[in-house]
Image: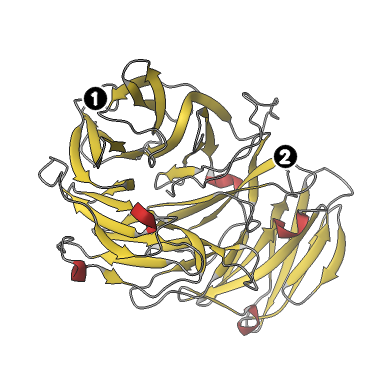
Amino acid sequence: MRAGRAVVLAALMIGGAAQPAHATPHFIVGTGQNPGVAVDAVGTAYIGWKVNVYADQGDAVQLCVLPAGARACASLATIPFPGAGYNLGRVSVLLPGAPGVVQVTVGRDLGPNYSQYVATSADGGVSFGAPVAFGSGFGIENDVLPDGRIVSDGNGAGNLSGAAYLPNGAQAGIDRTSLDDRGQFPDIAVQGADAYIAGSAAGPSAVVRLPAGANWLDPAAWQHLPDVNGEQPEIAPGPLGPVALLEPTPFAKREELFTQRWTGLRWTAPVDVGGVSYNSSFALAGSGTRLTGLWAVDPPGFPYLLDIVTSTDGGTLWSSEATIAVSSTALYSLELATNPAGHGVAVNGGDTNARPIWVYVIDPRKANSARARFGDTTVQVRTDLGDCVSEQRVHLRVQAARGGDLVSPSGVLRSARVSVSRSRILHRSRWSTLVDLRRTRAKRTATVRLVPRHGRARTLRYVVRGCGRIA
């Protein structure tokens, strides 16, 4: 849930080209700026964005209630807030857990001071009460703790800051606690009853934890975790601990987006998940046992592509990359929310000007892979689209995981033989096969013969899709 990057869009076409019948649904629900989203257990999405609707009063926030499977808002509420909020942080939509309760938070400029406000709905987002100021200072976005406190991050003067405010306004005059000098790209997540705030500028990212019940007003209560060597962190709760999705730092050897998980004692080793660095907006969501990563890329010869990956083991093994939508417009302000089943929506809209608010439906079944279990080790075959930025070539990679960490497949396998129907093998190494998919646009099936060091061989099969092929 990162604030939108300061990127100027050269052009933006309202509407979109006709989609194939099997394409992931994507559609416009309004026009505005810096959208936020939350999704409940049954898949209803609550999407909020900033709008300039009052000629004499300034701007407001609109909240769309989008039922699962719908392509239009079931209700659209307009919420006026004091002061001005356009170009000031992101709309955050919170679901505190009580039936029918939806909260919308946003930062406001009251001149000369900044404040944060929350508006609360008791009827599922159809109508809202008067906004209440709950905190001071320049806030970017918010999340909600199990006890109802609103945990907040900020980047005033480029510094990372955090708080855990009471929602009733009792702490409205208190600014967040300063945490680090790397706050240009902040993000926030709640894992259980703990809050995690991450931020970066240039270089490694800082991550700070506020333990359950700790007094956030005491700077010593915030626990500084070891840095992660990536930029623009997206952080989300996972079944085994919080997971960060990051972009490599400049001049790093890796080129793909990668994830790391906090075990409570250390960050796990980086796991490449895909994407093309330095030319993408990306987001991460976690709910229940599933994590979902999302990013937009602009490979040569293609429109903008929106790709996803999923993980059900806490972020060690990730599915194949799957292109779920093709857009004629740049996607630089992505936000993502999913429910425990992995269904949800991504939203994208303007960051400095009003733009269409696009909604992209997330279906975790689009991102496939094939797995087999050998004793205490899980072996997976996944498709990596990283090599198709110039040609229809993909890598099929064999991976293995044990005890929450990636391990070498050679510890459990003697060999892995890969073949792909109606395709040409360009290169083989022991655990990776480069495949040329340009010969046909028909469905291609990968067949992978896994020969273990002990026990019987297994054969895995799954569908392989190329660059720009809608899952």
Residue reaching furthest to the left: 170
Residue 73: image x %, image y %? 43, 22
User: Disc 1 residue type?
Assistant: Phe
Residue 128: mark in rendering = 1
Give neighbour class at mark 1: few <14, some 14-19, many 20+ (Cα, 10 Å): many
Residue reaching furthest to the front: 112
Rendered residue at 86%/63% (across/down): 425
Secondary structure, mark 1, is: loop
Rendered residue at 63%/39% (across/down): 330
Residue 362: image x %, image y %? 52, 40
In the image: residue 331, left or right of residue 205 = right
Q: Is residue 208 above or below residue 68?
A: below
Q: Is residue 327 visible in the rendered structure shown here?
A: yes
Residue 303: mark in rendering = 2
**Image quadrant of residue 210?**
bottom left
**Image quadrant of residue 12?**
top right
